[in-house]
Amino acid sequence: MSGPRDAYSFRSDAGVPAFPDDQPLIIFDGECIFCSGWVKFALKHDKSRRYRFLTAQSPLGEALYRHYGLDSRDYETNIFIDRGIAHFKSDGSIRMIAGLGFPWSLVTVFRLLPRALADRLYEFVARNRLRIAGRSSSCFVPTPEVRSRFLG
């Protein structure tokens, strides 16, 4: 199976349930402690509350992984959907972090790296994330204070 391209525009797909797409959406592996840590970081630093979140294990998350040609059982990348366009790997991560505002927007300097190199670094971390941080026996559960920012 081929991997995702740089970005995809979302098109109507009967296999993807309707969802609100008026704010950027981060789809992440809810069982990965490393990924859940990233979400906690984003929740803490997203002062404008612009991001929404979705676990890849949810029905909508699985449908979106399939829609974009990704393995819905092996979460090789988070998906960052902004303004109807999905971004993957290093590009998605840089966009997510930069969207948190200053000083996090300084991460855009990593766009100077050749995409192939940046993606190889991303893939190394993604492949080893479970060894780095482990896996939870259950999906990430948001607190009541942030529950409204999660879909699915």
Image (cartoon, rainbow, N blue to C red):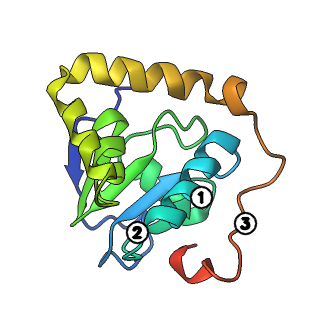
Q: Are marks 1 and 3 in contact (CB under 8 Å)?
A: no
Residue 123 lies, in percent from the top left, at: 44, 23
Q: Secondary structure at mark 2?
A: loop
Q: Is residue 29 visible?
A: no
Real-space CA distance between mark 1 and mark 3, rounded to the nearest whole angstrom: 11 Å
User: Which of the labelled discs sits on residue 141, or is there none?
Assistant: 3
Question: Would you place residue 49 above or below residue 2 in this image?
Answer: below
Rendered residue at 79%/45% (across/down): 136
Rendered residue at 33%/24% (across/down): 119
Question: Would you place residue 84 above or below residue 69 in this image?
Answer: below
Q: How many marks?
A: 3
Q: Secondary structure at mark 3?
A: loop
- For label 2, count other residues whose C-alpha is less than 10 Å away and answer few (under 14), some (14-19) or many (20+): many
State the quadrant of the C terminus.
bottom right
Q: Is residue 47 left or right of residue 110?
A: right
Quadrant in the rendering for residue 121:
top left
- For label 1, count other residues whose C-alpha is less than 10 Å away and answer few (under 14), some (14-19) or many (20+): some
Residue on which disc 2 sits: 51
Question: Would you place residue 77 above or below residue 130 in this image?
Answer: below
User: Which of the labelled discs sits on residue 81, or is there none?
Assistant: none
Mark 2: amino acid: Tyr
Question: Which numbered disc, 1 or 2, marks the residue that appears first in the sequence?
Answer: 1
Rendered residue at 35%/29% (across/down): 3
Mark 1: amino acid: Lys
Real-space CA distance between mark 2 and mark 3, rounded to the nearest whole angstrom: 16 Å
Quadrant in the rendering for residue 50:
bottom left
State the quadrant of the N terminus.
top left
Residue on which disc 1 sits: 40
Residue 5 lies, in percent from the top left, at: 24, 35
Real-space CA distance between mark 1 and mark 2, rounded to the nearest whole angstrom: 12 Å
Rendered residue at 52%/77% (across/down): 149
